[in-house]
Amino acid sequence: MIYKYRSFVLIIMIISFTACSSDKGKITANTPVAPPPPTPVEAFVTNLSSIGEKIELPGTVISGNSTELHPEISGRLTYLNIREGQNVSKGTLLAKIYDGDLQAKLNKLKVQLKVQEEKVKRYDELYKVNGVSTQEYDLIKLETSNLLADIRLVQSDIIRTEIRAPFAGRLGLKMVSDGAYVSPQTTLTTIRSTGDLQVEFTLPEKFSADLGIGSTVNFNIERNPKTYSAKIFARESGISESDRSLKLRAKIIGKTDEIIPGNFVKINISFAPDSQAIMIPSQAIIPLAKGKQVALSKNGKAEFINVETGIRTEKMVQVTEGLSAGDTVITTGLMKLKDGSKIKVSKTISNN
């Protein structure tokens, strides 16, 4: 009997506890939920500032004239005067191909021409006294002209057996030996002019309007503390579609004894300062798959806008589109915000 009484009391207690829990849940569900507090953030107030852009570009020293030397005809070298690394003047004979057969042919033609000239003299005398017809006289003159033409052709072939320096410059490495058989595909050596060295480099598209013909750039060479200057004299006709850049060439100014073609150089270019630049902390920029954004503080809420950027420094980024002076840019807590989120600015700074 006592056992049944205790069981009854336990059931009553369980039912009462369940009812109380249910009532408590109903009260909690009907109670209004308090809105989340504003997200605390720090902000940066923009203003106009002056900033000048400096860029460093890679470049290469090239010669105003540079070429490989090849023979015009095939044959055996009978003379080789390539002094590696030496300067030569224009027209210096560097190599000679065997021309014995051509010289023999030339001598034969010269003998024939001498005989022909004597014949022409006789015909001249006969023609004056009507001893030969006009047709015969014209024919003998034509034969003489043909001989002269043949002589000029052979002389031209003999000239082609000579390889001479096309301009004054410095010779490269010798690629053949004395007595070698060469052809027009054979490289004998290279020659580069030394008096008109140039620097070739490419300029990003956005700066293409800032450097024109006559502009001066400065550059440095590895392990050389000296700064050199060069004046731009040529620009490519258009911007490359592959890397969106413009190729330029500048002639080096002054003495260049320590500079050689092929030198790698670092070109330093300073552009005129922009007095209307807007700079913001780099952490305020939100990169997206397409473009960039910043979050503004407006009327206690976050507002996200698209921006375009320009110059970067160690801690700041220039905003070229999207912001105006006086805008308040959020710099912290960006991962917690979305457009329209309530915020509370706990700290505001500027670059004044």
Image (cartoon, grey):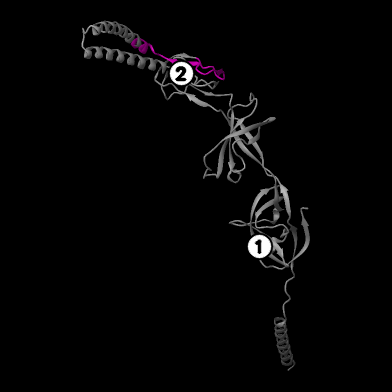
Q: Residue placed farthest to the front in the image?
A: 129
Q: Residue placed farthest to the bottom in the image?
A: 1
* Secondary structure state at the residue bearing disc 1: strand
* Secondary structure state at the residue bearing disc 2: strand
Q: Is residue 96 magenta?
A: yes
Please say whether residue 314 is visible from this viewpoint: no
Residue 248 numbered tag: none
Q: Residue at x 22, y 14 (%)?
A: 135
Position of residue 320 relative to residue 162, above or below, is: below
Q: Residue at x 35, y 17 (%)?
A: 153
Q: Residue at x 64, y 29 (%)?
A: 253
Task: Please name the amino acid that badge 1 sits on.
Answer: Phe
Q: Is residue 213 magenta?
A: no
Mark 2 vs 1, N-terminal side: 2
Task: Please name the amino acid that badge 2 sits on.
Answer: Ile
Between the C-alphas of marks 2 and 1, the distance is 72 Å
- Percent position of residue 277, x then y: 70, 51
Residue, disc 2: 163
* Observer-nearest of 188 and 300: 300
- Percent position of residue 235, x then y: 55, 37
* Observer-nearest of 315 and 217: 217
> Total marks drawn?
2
- Percent position of residue 14, x then y: 71, 86
Location of the N terminus by quadrant is: bottom right
For residue 333, what is the image quadrant? bottom right
Residue, disc 1: 304
Give neighbour class at mark 2: few <14, some 14-19, many 20+ (Cα, 10 Å): many
For residue 324, what is the image quadrant? bottom right
58 with respect to 278 (left or right): left
- Percent position of residue 22, x then y: 70, 85
Q: Which residues are magenta?
A: 81-105
